[in-house]
Image (cartoon, rainbow, N blue to C red):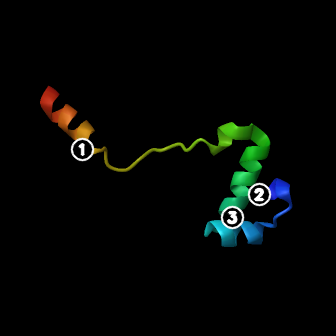
Amino acid sequence: MSAQGRTVKDITTLMQVGEDYVREVIHAFNGRGFDALDPKWSGGRPGPSMTRCASASA
């Protein structure tokens, strides 16, 4: 969207995210390309299938 000439404010309104987040994504994309858009999921509680596997192997 930034390449289409939209401002950070326009993108925040459309995507319902904060300005800092939009700027981070734009900078990451400029530096790493499409790899920057691949979500890096981490943290949190493991899913139910992982819990079942762990208890079954114990």
Residue at image point 25% right, 38% down: 49
Does residue 49 lie above or below 28 as drawn?
Answer: above
- Cα distance between the residues tagged 1 and 3: 33 Å
Q: Position of residue 10 (x, y in %)?
A: 75, 70
Q: Position of residue 18 (x, y in %)?
A: 64, 68
Q: Amino acid at mark 2?
A: Met
Q: Tell me how many marks there are.
A: 3
Q: Position of residue 32 (x, y in %)?
A: 73, 38
Q: Nearer the viewer, residue 36 or 15?
A: 15
* Image quadrant assignment for residue 53: top left
Residue at image point 76% right, 50% down: 27
Mark 3 packing: few (<14 Cα in 10 Å), some, or many (20+)? few
Q: Amino acid at mark 3?
A: Asp
Query: On the image, numbered disc 1 is attached to which residue?
Result: 48
Mark 2 packing: few (<14 Cα in 10 Å), some, or many (20+)? few
Locate residue 55 relative to residue 4 in the image: left or right. left
**Which circle's residue, 2 or 3, is located before the other in the chain?**
2
* Image quadrant assignment for residue 50: top left
Where disc 1 sits, the SS reads: helix
Query: On the image, numbered disc 2 is attached to which residue?
Result: 1
Where disc 2 sits, the SS reads: loop
Does residue 53 lie above or below 39 as drawn?
Answer: above
Q: Quadrant of the N terminus?
A: bottom right
Q: Amino acid at mark 1?
A: Pro
Locate residue 14 relative to residue 45 in the image: left or right. right
The answer to whether marks 2 and 1 mark residues whose Cβ atoms lie closer than 8 Å is no
